[in-house]
Amino acid sequence: MNRIRASVWLIAALAALATVATACGGTTTPGTTSKDTITVAGFNFPESSILAELYGQALAHDGYTVNYKLLLGTREVLAPAIKSGQIDLYPGYAATDLEYYNSGAGEATGDATATTAKLNSHLSSIGLIALTPSAAVDQNAFAVTKATQTKYTLSKLSDLAPIGNQLVLGAGPECPTRPFCQPGLKTTYGITFKDFKALDTDGPLTRAAFKNGTIQVGLVFSSDADLNQLGLVVLQDDKHLENADNVVPIARQAVATPEVTSVLNKVDAGLTTADLVTMNGQVELLHQDADAVAAAYLQQHNFFS
């Protein structure tokens, strides 16, 4: 799940930033022709390491020398590091990055292209650029069990409008007052639930409630590692209630040459949320290494052919 939404004390961020130069990482041997050296960083959760490895290994195959600075910390650490040139690239999330760089101005929407364009309006003046966003997204989502999906023939959130009064929604206790939770489901989709059960935000209480049938709809994150294992199905946000936290590379403009951009856009063009769920599961549940999981994905999708 995406753990970068929590706020962090500035002093902790500054302390962590001091570790950038010596943080755990490595170097990928480039392909046949050595080009520039690019330092790829990641946030302090597994999905970010996987994405950083996908970008880094694709660049290395194209002939670049890649240094990795994985698990560096939060955006409060990575943003100053990339602005100062200590790192060159990190896998970002369109809406969350926009709201970070615009100091929480509320400009993000459910449109990934528009949100990325707005993000670039803030990045351009500090020498950064967000590339083409992927279809893969890590954001708040609403899931049902496969049994509930089959019973009511559900695929998208708008399918819940006619039957919501038969279903119980479960989420964190703040859900009834948050615009992207229960009120948003009502105003955007016209869904009125039979009841609401205050649990946790995408945590063990929600999962237990799904298992024992206490809830039929629950708040999760769209790329959670255990969705497949638990038999949960994320319903498509077809009216774009949630802000577009699509995966998008954030790079220094000096590094984002046409060739580098082409390599990274090729990775993003094929990446789906289902791919994220699968790879997150391999790392978080099966305890495989992020670099091996990324290499297998790129091999399967003909990046190394």
Image (cartoon, grey):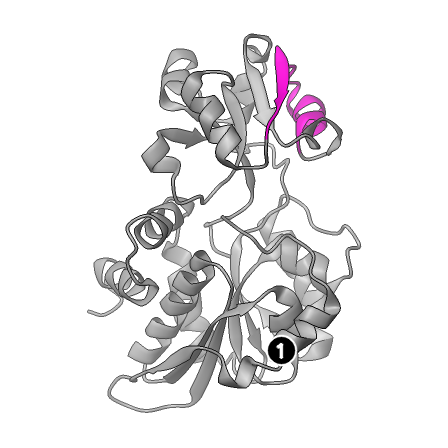
Give the residue drawn at x 28%, y 90%: 33
Q: Is residue 141 left or right of residue 281?
A: right
The answer to whether one can see residue 155 in this image is no
Q: Is residue 93 above or below residue 14?
A: above
Q: Which residues are magenta?
A: 181-199
Quadrant in the picture for the C terminus: bottom left
Give the residue drawn at x 56%, y 15%: 168
> In terms of image quadrants, where is residue 264?
bottom left
Out of 33 and 29, give the one closest to the viewer.
29
Q: Is residue 123 left or right of residue 261?
A: right
Give the residue drawn at x 59%, y 53%: 113
Out of 13 and 241, give the one closest to the viewer.
13
Secondary element under disc 1, as helix, strand or loop, is helix
The answer to whether one can see residue 116 in this image is yes
Q: Is residue 65 above or below residue 58?
A: below
Mark 1 belongs to which amino acid?
Answer: Leu
Q: Is residue 252 magenta?
A: no
Residue 298: horizontal and vertical position, in percent?
28, 63
Residue at the spot of label 1:
17
